[in-house]
């Protein structure tokens, strides 16, 4: 069964990371995974939350949101509804956990960085695109702190590993990498894989959307996800070197 966009099963969508997309934040990146576009900004604040004061540790957290018309039909803003949804909370926490795996919070010193990931256009894989783009925005924010000699450790020790993420799934019995929306809604198995540039797993979220899946399918999906994250890590490296 051919993929909707003609890609091979192990092929990523075209990936673009545009740094400095927004003027004001200390780090900003527009990340594009095919038709999915997410603006990731990193905002630096001197000091840490009250519960972390005096620890010598910094803090990194994230917030995720989707514009009302990022999808085929308009959704009300959660601020208008007066309540942030469970899905939004879950994705925000995933992004925060993933990015904290990339940074030495002691070397960061008592500084806070908030990563805001706003989905401008959704075509599947918004959370994985957000993680991949937020890493680059976070890196630029740390570089900004380093230029002001505001870090507790050496700049190269603060961002001590890269982190990227990609979706994988089983559609019509076939394992596929980087699902777009059309594939995502039809997936028998849906999984998000977060990895370091060295090929270590940070987090894996997977579920049988239509029944169960075998150990062999799990292994195939993890292999696909890992290979995809290695490609994304190289895209991040090139973006930061540009």
Image: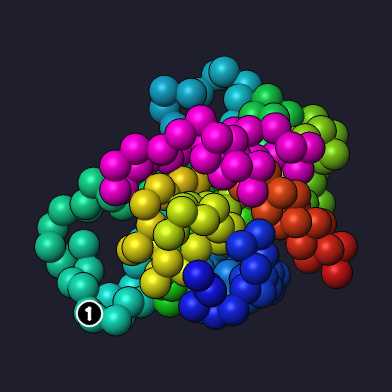
**Horizontal relation, residue 91 to residue 83: left or right:** right
**Which residue: 12% across, 62% down?**
81
Q: Which residue is more in the foreground, 130 or 193?
A: 193
Name the colouring of the figure.
rainbow
The answer to which quarter of the image holds residue 107 is top right
Confirm whether the magenta stretch covers residue 33.
no
Residue located farthest toward the left when viewing the structure as drawn: 81
Frontmost residue, 123 versus 187: 187
Magenta stretch holds residue 202 = yes
Residue 133 location in percent, x, y?
61, 60
Task: Answer left or right for 202 relative to 145.
Answer: left
Q: Which residues are magenta?
A: 195-224
Left or right, 170 with respect to 69, comes to right
Look at the image and tell me whether residue 202 can be seen: yes
Q: Residue 24, can we see it?
A: no
Count the marks. Answer: 1
**Residue 50 x/y as whole percent:** 41, 27
Mark 1, other Cα within 10 Å: few <14 / some 14–19 / many ≥20: few
Q: Residue at x 66, y 42 (%)?
A: 223
Q: Which residue is mark 1?
A: 74
Judge whether 107 appears above or below 81 on screen.
above
Asked if 20 appears above or below 165 in the picture, the reply is below
Nearest to the observer: residue 158 or residue 145: 158
Image quarter in which the C terminus is found? bottom right
Residue 123 placement (x, y as % from top left): 43, 72
In the depicted structure, whether residue 42 falls above or below residue 221: below
Relative image position of residue 175 (x, y in whole percent): 54, 53
């Amino acid at each position: 069964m051919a993929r909707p966009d003609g890609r091979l099963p192990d092929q990523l969508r075209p990936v673009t990371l545009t740094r400095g997309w927004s003027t004001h934040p200390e780090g900003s990146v527009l990340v594009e995974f095919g038709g999915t576009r997410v603006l990731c900004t990193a905002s630096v604040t001197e000091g840490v939350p009250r519960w972390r004061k005096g620890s010598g540790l910094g803090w990194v957290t994230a917030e995720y949101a989707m514009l009302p018309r990022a999808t085929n039909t308009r959704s009300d803003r959660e601020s208008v509804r007066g309540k942030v949804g469970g899905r939004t909370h879950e994705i925000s926490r995933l992004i925060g956990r993933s990015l904290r795996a990339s940074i030495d919070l002691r070397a960061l010193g008592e500084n806070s960085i908030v990563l805001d990931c706003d989905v401008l256009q959704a075509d599947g894989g918004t959370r994985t695109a957000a993680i991949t783009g937020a890493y680059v925005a976070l890196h630029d924010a740390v570089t900004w702190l380093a230029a002001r000699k505001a870090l507790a450790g050496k700049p190269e020790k603060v961002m001590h590993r890269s982190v990227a993420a990609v979706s994988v799934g089983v559609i019509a019995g076939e394992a596929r990498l980087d699902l777009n929306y059309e594939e995502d809604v039809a997936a028998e198995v849906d999984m998000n894989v977060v990895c370091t540039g060295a090929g270590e797993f940070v987090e894996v979220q997977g579920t049988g959307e239509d029944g169960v899946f075998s150990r062999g399918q799990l292994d195939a999906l993890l292999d696909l996800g890992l290979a995809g994250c290695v490609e994304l890590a190289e895209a991040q490296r090139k973006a930061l070197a540009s």
